Amino acid sequence: MKLIITLIFLLLTNCKTNEYKLIGITSKIEEIFYYGKDFSVSAWNIDEERLNKVRLEIKNSIAMQKLDNPKEKWKEISEIATKDGNYILFQIFPETRIPSEFLSFQFQLNDFSPLKQYSYYNEIIETNIRTRYYNTPGAFYMGGFYGTSRGFIYSMSARPIEQDLNQKLTHSYNFLILFSKENLKKENRFRVITPNGNFIDFEFNNP
């Protein structure tokens, strides 16, 4: 039993998350007008593996935009790496697509401003299928008493009667923000300032 407890303790202590903990929003009620009553936010400390995925998502976004210098932008995104500094991904999930004026966020890490930032939009579609069944004609035999050939034939076979298809569309606005590694501390405070002037505060503790 002591060995099992020790192993569980080691697993728990070795587990770590890259997600920033949301502390709060100074006035979420004011932001509901812009993002809807069920909007949510998240922030992540980005490692090299996650950065590779974000890089692809930004390139997909570039391909869908009309830019004056798409080749230069493509090259810039191809070269971003964790050696540049500390990357944080801020995400906001509003109820609908929103105008660009609602997305002019400002960012701070421990009261320091970012070196660079990139933004892109994603649509996430979740699909759930539920099937209901009913009995249709089919061979089903219930035998008679032992030593006789008598029995009863029933018609029973389960087949789908209908399917419910439910789809949920999630709008994701993403901001990849680069800070200097010199801005990092043991306990980090990441602040997002909304266009309306409210603060969205997160915290993250380095191991």
Image: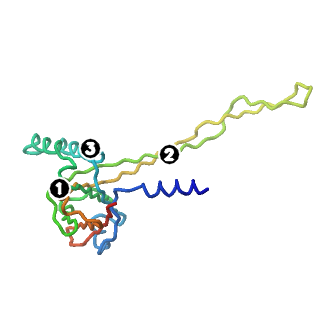
Q: Residues within 10 Å of mark 1 (few under 14, many from 20)?
A: some
Residue at the limit of the structure toward the front, as seen here: 2
Residue 103 pos. (x, y %): 21, 61
Q: 141 above or below 195?
A: above
Q: Mark 3 points at which residue?
A: 52
- Residue at 31% over, 66% down: 203
Dot 3 or dot 2: first in sequence order is 3
How far across and down, in percent of the image, does residue 137 sit? 68, 32
Who is closer to the viewer here, 69 or 108? 108
Check disc 2 and give the amino acid type.
Asp
Residue at mark 1? 117
Spatial distance from mark 2 to mark 1, Cα to Cα? 42 Å
Marking on residue 164: 2
> Tag 1: residue type?
Gln
Q: CA–CA distance between discs 3 and 2? A: 36 Å
Which of the pair 56/189 is nearer the observer?
189
Q: Please identify, in this view, whether the residue under mark 3 or under mark 2 is nearer the observer.
A: 3
